[in-house]
Amino acid sequence: MREITYVEALREAIRMAMEKDPSVFVIGEDIGVYGGAFGVTAGLIDQFGKDRIIDTPISEAGIAGACVGAALTGMRPIGEMQFSDFVVLAMEQLTLQAAKVRFMFGGKATVPMVMRLAGGSGTGAAAQHSESLEAWFVHVPGLKVVMPSSPAEAKGLLLASIYDDNPVLFFEHKLLYKTKGPVPEEWYTTPLGKSKVVREGKHLTVVATSIEVVRAQQAAEILSKEGIELEIIDPRTLRPLDMEPIVNSVMKTGKVLIVHEAVKMGGFGGEVAAQIAESRAFGYLDAPIRRLAGLDMPIPYNRNLEAHAVPQVENIVDEARNLVKGVY
């Protein structure tokens, strides 16, 4: 199978949806001639024109509001915010409007929109451009939250998100954009709300999201040489969350490590830990549920400090090894 980058997979999904369906359009800052802050929409304006690849002023509230209004009138907008941090400027449109309209109108109105958000650290973009805010939106009923960890997932999940009749927050980690992987050329969708067992193992369950899935796989290769086999699960969709593969894995391994880049306090990992504790897997645990997450601080500009602020491969290796060996 051919290999393409995460960026190319996203662009291919957008192009396919726009070619198939005239109700799909993209709206955001610098997405036209410039091609987007990270190049995802490069070249699309040449094919679809400025009426469907819509450059906006610097107004995140305007982008989100336009998406909500367009979705309510039968369109399927794809909004882009240059950095996920800027979503704070559009919270009213997303959490008070998009998330609640379908419920308030008894299903007679839907809001089929996608808001693409470039998040995460690792590019030296500092505290205001490097956050991981996905847990905020997991807390809001009516929204769906997606975090693809590979090019193949990026394409399949984005196409599924575009054709979901609910508002979707689509978080793309900036360090994943240049990663390559096998991606089918044809149209396909990856169902929302289905966790994936990325790697099978027997000694420890690792639940990881986004870039941490990649780092967990690298850690698993290192630990495998020591005879420690990690089972890695990628939720892919944080809301709705599919706990069944996670519960089954914990029942098999008896141990679980939850890894995400966002800070630990109030992070998504706490919800996973709570649901494990409330599930049939609780009686199978023979070690404490552990979370490995970002430090409780804004992301530093200094590259060494930035790397230290979020879980890296070596951190996963150390935590996993200690859990398996009973060092808590």
Image (tube, rainbow, N blue to C red):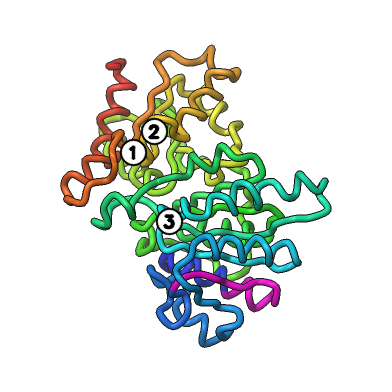
Q: Which mark is residue 86?
A: 3
Q: Which mark is residue 19?
A: none
Camera-side residue: 98 or 75?
A: 98
Q: Nearer the viewer, mark 3 or mark 1?
A: 3
Distance (Cα) linking label 3 and label 2: 36 Å
Query: Upstream in the sequence, badge 3 or badge 1?
Result: 3
- Answer left or right for 281 relative to 22: left
Label 3: state its secondary structure.
Answer: helix
In the image, residue 303 lies at what x, y percent?
Answer: 18, 51
Q: Amino acid at mark 2?
A: Leu
Q: Amino acid at mark 1?
A: Ala
In the image, residue 78 lies at what x, y percent?
Answer: 58, 65
Query: Upstream in the sequence, badge 3 or badge 2?
Result: 3
Label 1: state its secondary structure.
Answer: helix
- Look at mark 1 in the image and give the residue it sits on: 220
166 in magenta: no
Give the answer, above or below, for where 304 lies relative to 178: above
Crowding at label 1, few (<14), some or many (≥20) Cα neighbours within 10 Å?
many
Distance (Cα) linking label 3 and label 1: 34 Å
Asked whether disc 2 touches disc 1, contact meaning CB atoms under 8 Å apart, the reply is yes
Distance (Cα) linking label 2 and label 1: 6 Å
Q: Quadrant of residue 178?
A: bottom left
- Answer left or right for 243 relative to 132: right
Q: Amino acid at mark 3?
A: Phe
Which residue range is magenta in the image?
15-29
Could you tell me if residue 1 is visible in this image?
no
In the image, residue 263 lies at what x, y percent?
Answer: 36, 36
Could you tell me if residue 326 is visible in this image?
yes
Tell me the residue at 42%/72% (across/down): 36
- Look at mark 2 in the image and give the residue it sits on: 230
Give the answer, above or below, for where 168 lies relative to 18: above
Camera-side residue: 166 or 241?
A: 166
